[in-house]
Image: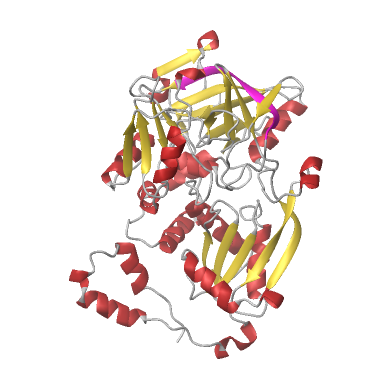
Amino acid sequence: MTVIRDLRDYIKVSEDLGVLKRIDGAELELEIGALSDLYRRRKSTLFDKIKGYPAGYRVFSNIFAVDKQQKAMLGVPLEATTLDFVRQVKRKMSDFRSVRPTEVSSGPVTQNIMKGADVDLLKFPTPRWHEMDGGRYIGTADSVITRDPDSGWVNLGTYRVMLQDKNTVSSYMSPGRHGRFMRDKYWSKGQNCPVAVVVGNDPLLFTMSQTSVPYGVSEYEFAGWLRGEAIEVVKGPFTGLPIPASAEIVLEGEMLPPEKESRQEGPFGEWTGYYASGSRSEPVIHVKTVLFRNDPILTGVSSGLVPSEVRGNIIRSATLWSQLEAAGVPGINGVWYMEPGGSYLLIAISIKQGFPGHAMQAGMAAAGCREGSYLNRFVIVVDDDIDPTNENDVWWAMASRCDPATSINIVGNCWASALDPRLDPVKRAAGDYSSSRAIVNACKPFHWMKDFPRVVNTSPQLTEKVIAKYKNILGDLSQEDLYRASRSKVVM
């Protein structure tokens, strides 16, 4: 299988898989966003010959249109079921050994460099993704790179970045995020915060930028471990920050404290499907250097109404699974961030019940883990005969095994965000970004589990026999469908 080392490798593999749509001649003003929406969860979209820009200056959206793209990115067999995919990534991440990035003197990203007065961000095609957006967003599928001023720890995080003018952008960082902690440290010392924004991103680094890695560990180290080789970086000429050597476009500069300068940012149609965070004054980044490849590709996320194209589900699910096991929760069969809101809002956890209170232990632990604690609405715990990645089965378990009066527990004052559309206006005005969440026990009652009615389903043995006998007429079923059916669990 091809090792995907950068965005261009990923685009080629996506085309080979038949899930890339090339579109020429689209306009930046809303058309790229609308066309991305049409192909969401169907195909990745690569826009070229954009009106008003040279051929070769491209925009790539719908990065993770289908799961097999992520399987190819991480070297997992394409026929693996989604749950087996999560298992394999979780196994790899649980055995994590730091693979530090390798600094090189140059790379494709250094093919072109704009400095000082020559910086012109208007050179790059930056869409206005949605009709009600407050401006054009150059940073959506991005990695914002910062370094802790005390420890030297380098962090990559995904934060939205709005184009203000030819050499200025503004950025919104949610409270509680590592990049925001680092930014505030610089400001407390009376310093501007050095920052590099990758807006033409390696999909693996974009994925890691959305994932909770241990405090003090760089996303570069995890990405190198998952890829099986060190990520090559170059030293940023202005900030000195490590920049991916094969990135498409990188903006280097410094973020000023709001008392020095801030500008209106937003609204932006976010992954929750709402314009919940509105418009406000946010800090700006003065861009001092821009590095970019020949014929650069800007990566973007249309976001908006779910299901979202931001498919951090695989690595995020594997990470939460590992954190639950580290917290001492036994018998976990699978973890999945569900759609809609696959980024955070709904979590399903499948367990093999071993004792009274086991389901509640799993749910409460998920609500308290770093990976599961941000802007989560519902943690749904199901039995091990339910595949948590099969959302119809999760809803069936919730509808048939959950007693609303006794099986739903509400926890208050949990970590949320200004992006939360359900945040009370009074709390929002006070800056109180906290919310409640529900722990839903959708398992069979433990104390009479053996007496619970049997499930009606075809056994794996009969399924395998039928697949073998009729394989010549089953061509319209995918390999994943067949694999899932042959491995289905049934309680007899």
Dominant secondary structure (helix, strand or loop) of the stretch shown in magenta: strand
Q: Tell me where residue 163 appears, x and y as whole percent.
A: 56, 24
What coloring was used for the rendering? secondary structure
Q: Tell me where residue 192 appears, x and y as whole percent.
A: 69, 22
Tell me the magenta residue range.
279-291
Residue that protrudes farthest toward the left in the picture: 472
Q: Nearer the viewer, residue 105 or 455?
A: 455
> Looking at the picture, does residue 209 appear above or below residue 170?
below
Q: Is residue 462 left or right of residue 197?
A: left
Residue drawn where x is 45% and y is 22% of the image: 124
The number of discs equals: 0
Quarter of the figure with the C terminus: bottom left
Q: Is residue 149 magenta?
A: no
Residue 409 in sight here? yes
> Looking at the picture, does residue 371 appear above or below residue 144?
below
Q: Tell me where residue 276 appears, x and y as whole percent.
A: 66, 43
Residue drawn where x is 58% and y is 80% of the image: 444
Residue 331 in sight here? no
Residue drawn where x is 77% and y is 45% of the image: 425
Q: Is residue 89 left or right of residue 78?
A: right
Give residue 452's quadrant in the image. Answer: bottom right
Q: Nearer the viewer, residue 112 or 104?
A: 112
Q: Nearer the viewer, residue 180 or 96?
A: 180
Q: Tell me where residue 428 appears, x and y as whole percent.
A: 76, 43
